Image: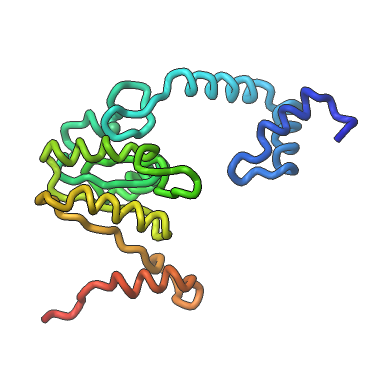
Amino acid sequence: MKHFSPILQDLINAFKGLPGIGVKSAQRIVFNLIQHNQEKALFLSDTIKNALENINECSNCRMYTDSDLCEICSDPQRDSAMLCVIESPADMIAIENSMSFNGKYFVLMGKLSPLDGIGPDQLKLDMLESIVKEGAIREIILANSPTIEGEATASYILGLIENTDIEATRIAYGVPMGGELEYVDSSTLTQALNNRSLVSKK
Ligand SMILES: [Zn+2]
């Protein structure tokens, strides 16, 4: 890499290591931006700067927003009695795109992982506890990922609502629509079997 301009190398390094981008892709992106898309490159740099300066966490649910409250928390049409707990803003977008949920959310921004130094404080579970104590929630949907850390986080949250009237549900993970069983990995299949629901009439 010695024959590269250090400025060019810095730019490649800035892209390298982003999710899904290795060194080859980083080089392709950088050369494309410089050769053919300088206007787009400037737009990219401006929008990143703008987002970093103006985006913060919603004071109620922790979703990224440019106001105090996010669009969902400030929407009176959303059902405040249903709270879906998710691990990331991307999870919220996925659920919103499914158009199957009209409640509110709480974004943990991660999952409990003591070995990585992520405990209840990092997930701001005290914020979730205060929301629970306000008493408006009827059902809490635990949409934590089906991993050891996700399950541990879900159990911790169950502990928070132990002495309340809130009903806790866990989303089911299973076979994708149109999927064939032979292509489904074994942990997904185990979850699908464990979360089977009754279909007979009785
Ligand atoms: Zn919010």
Against 197, residue 80 (above or below) is above
Query: Between residues 6 and 153, which one lies in front from this camera angle?
Result: 153
- Ligand 1's quadrant: top left
Residue 170's image quarter?
bottom left
Q: Closest to the observer: 120 or 13?
A: 120
Give x and y (percent) for residue 32: 72, 32
Which residue is rendered at x = 30% and y = 22% of the image? 68
Residue closer to the observer: 188 or 160? 160
123 displayed left or right of 24: left
Q: Residue at x 22, y 48 (%)?
A: 160
User: Which corner quadrant of the image does residue 81 belong to?
Assistant: top left
Tally the numbered discs: 0
x and y, in percent, of residue 130 in the image: 20, 36
Q: Is residue 124 left or right of residue 55?
A: left
Drawn side of residue 13 relative to residue 97, left or right:
right
> Relative to residue 172, is residue 112 depicted above or below?
above
Quadrant of the drawing holding the N terminus: top right
* Residue at left offset 65%, top offset 40%: 17
Observer-nearest residue: 166 or 71? 166
Q: Locate residue 128, reporting x and y percent.
A: 25, 39
Residue 115: image location, x then y, percent = 49, 49
* Quarter the C terminus occupies: bottom left
Tell me the colour scheme of the image: rainbow
Residue at the spot x=71%, y=33% of the render?
A: 13
* Position of 174 relative to 58 (above/below): below
